[in-house]
Amino acid sequence: MSAVLETLGDRLAATRRARFVGREAELARFADAFTTDTPPFHVALVYGPGGIGKTSLLDELALQAREAGVGVARLDARDLRPSPEAVATAAEAVLEAAGDGRRLLLVDTYERIEGLDGWLRRTFVPSLRATDLVVLAGRNRPAAEWRSTWAGAVAEIPLRNLAPAEAEAFLDARGVPEAEREPVLAFTHGHPLALTLAAEWVRQRGDDAAFDPAEAPSLLGDLLARFVADVPTPVHRAALEGAALVRAVTVPLLDALLSPTGGDGAASSSPEALFEWVRDLAFTEVDAHGIRLHDVVRETIEADLRWRDPDRHAAFHERARHYYGARLRTARRDEDRRRALGDYLHLYRHHPVARPLLRRLYDSWAESDFAGSGPLRDGDAETVRALTAQHLGEAEAEAVAGWMERRPDAIEVFHTTDGSVAGALLTLPLDALDADARRSDPVVEATWGTVGSRLREGERGLLFRSWLDADAGQSVSAVQSLVFARTVERYLTTPGLASSVVLTSEPDLWGPVFTLVGLQRWPEAEAPGRETPLAAFGKDWRATPPDVWIEELAARAPGDPAPPAPDPDDALVVLSEEAFAEAVHEALKVVARPHRLAESPLLQARLVRERGGEPLEALQALLEEAAQQLADGVRERPYYRALDLTYFRPAPTQAIVAERLDLPFSTYRRHLRRGVDHVVEVLWRAETGG
């Protein structure tokens, strides 16, 4: 009779339970909570990325709770309007249905109502019965206030990929032949959703199917068809493919990815409508930063696009790089800078140099607890000194302490939400340091010997003297990503920046990354014989201005090689003010004769490099524009006419020019001299960033 009364839901639950594997440690934490009068916690905060198995864990908890006689109330935040009234009404309804005894309230997809976190923590949860248990499951790490406000009553349960043995059991429960498991495990790395998809592919193909990750686009074709089979138009498919390349897509980003100039026909549907369509797909999630595709879905769609249409993939990638490059230039807040850098680096997640570092970096951010950065607070100097000694040695700690005393404005401290020091960055303006300050630190003195001698009046030099994470030192960490975001910001916002140097105690780790983004090892800027050797990586920004550098990075696809070291024959020419003035005067004399102008040292000057394009044409344009400024002023117009007829549209002799201008020769010469002085002044300001 019981078999007759068995419902389809009962059978589905039994199937799910038979297939559930792993999570023993997580489930063990609930055993006492279900069976004792004094549970070890009242609130459990379950979190992890999409597809990691949060919902499956809640299913198993519900089954175990019912077996222990605990009433189960369940909510999915996707079904709730994010308001206190709506959540309270829905929760009261399911809790009432759970009975009068001990109850378990499960809230899935908690990130959808994270905006109500404070109300839930301060008002709703405290209003529940003393015997109730609450589980909140979402993508993001819960706010630190849960740990402080509910200290001793909260359990944090982060979910990670399944361990190898658990992943084996997962595939065994789904009937994947043992011979097929090794490549599946290597491809999925224990990610539950990826395992599910791969197992389904093997099941559909039969026991003799050969799973080859190298052929993932074709092997996962049947699964991919599920994602895109009902795509309304080619433009909607393009929106899905574009979203697969990025961490999270927003309306402006989607608009940039589907630029009509790329031939995708995005004009036929608005970015706003496409964004809403992507958001409603079953395999997407929404957070404060936009729409995310589930990791395995994203990787599958991108892999298919890269295999099926590499030109289209490259076009999407280029548009995304330019979009993030622009955000890097304009970001002002710490969070915006970090986000822009992270989004940019995500595009390089398959690059052989960047891939392992990015994986470790994302793990670090998942565990970080930042509150921001700022100047030294009381007690910070002692902490930073102690951390520097721990990670970089006593000599380095002494040097950093000295700079914190002399230049407290040069140190930036990163803090956690509880106020402790998470890390620090010491940035010194080389051009603003006096000789005594430089000599106090052999490292700075060595750098100055290489950089300072080439700085001209008005030019700036930056030395990123020391940086570290409280726990990781100079290894991969969340603080390290903030440090790099800050260096990029300083590159882009420091007027007249001529040179910069980053010092690191981990050259083997960071050297390939620095080289990838165009920084070069400068051994001559390194101080020898130190307890902790520091490698110097620098860049002369007069050769490649920061804006040009960002554009060059944006134009470089992930598979492109790192830029080569500058050719000595094509090196930047750094002229003194006197030599620069002479070079401008000589260039004016031959501006109308390009074959002679090609010999000018100004072609290798900063202002010409910054102008971009063909150097000869750039120099001609700079000279003409500087002279043209004089044409608009009543008093200055005679100076322009003297320049124009002497250099730009030259007469055979200066005497003829004076005659055409109807001026005494001495007056003409005076006008010409003042015109030349003006051009020199304008171009010198451009050369030195004034």
Image (tube, rainbow, N blue to C red):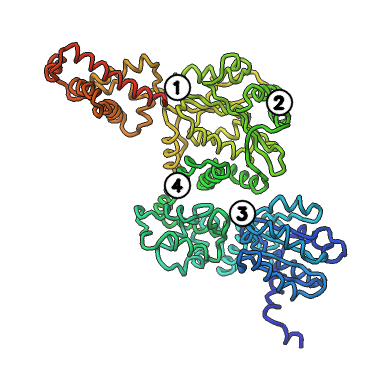
At label 2, counting other C-alpha atoms closer than 10 Å, the crowd grade (few under 14, some 14-19, many 20 or more) is: some
Residue at far right of view = 37
Q: Say which label, 3 or 1, has the lower sequence index.
A: 3
The residues bearing labels 2 and 1 have C-alpha atoms spaced at a distance of: 36 Å
Q: Position of residue 200 (x, y in %)?
A: 59, 67
Q: Which residue is mark 4?
A: 323
| Quadrant holding the C terminus | top left
Residue located at (76% from left, 85% from top): 2
Q: Which residue is mark 2?
A: 393
User: What residue is pinned by disc 1?
Assistant: 458
As drawn, 322 above or below 90 = above
Give the labeled residue for mark 3: 186
Query: Nearer the observer, disc 3 or disc 1?
Result: 1
Give the residue type that dot 3 points to. Ala
Q: Measuring from the top left, give residue 312's x and y in whole percent.
A: 40, 54
Q: Earlier in the sequence, mark 4 or mark 2?
A: 4
- Mark 2 or 1: the one toward you: 1
At numbered mark 3, what does the secondary structure look like: helix, strand or loop? helix
Structural distance between the alpha carbons of marks 3 and 4: 33 Å
Q: Residue at x 47, y 58 (%)?
A: 304
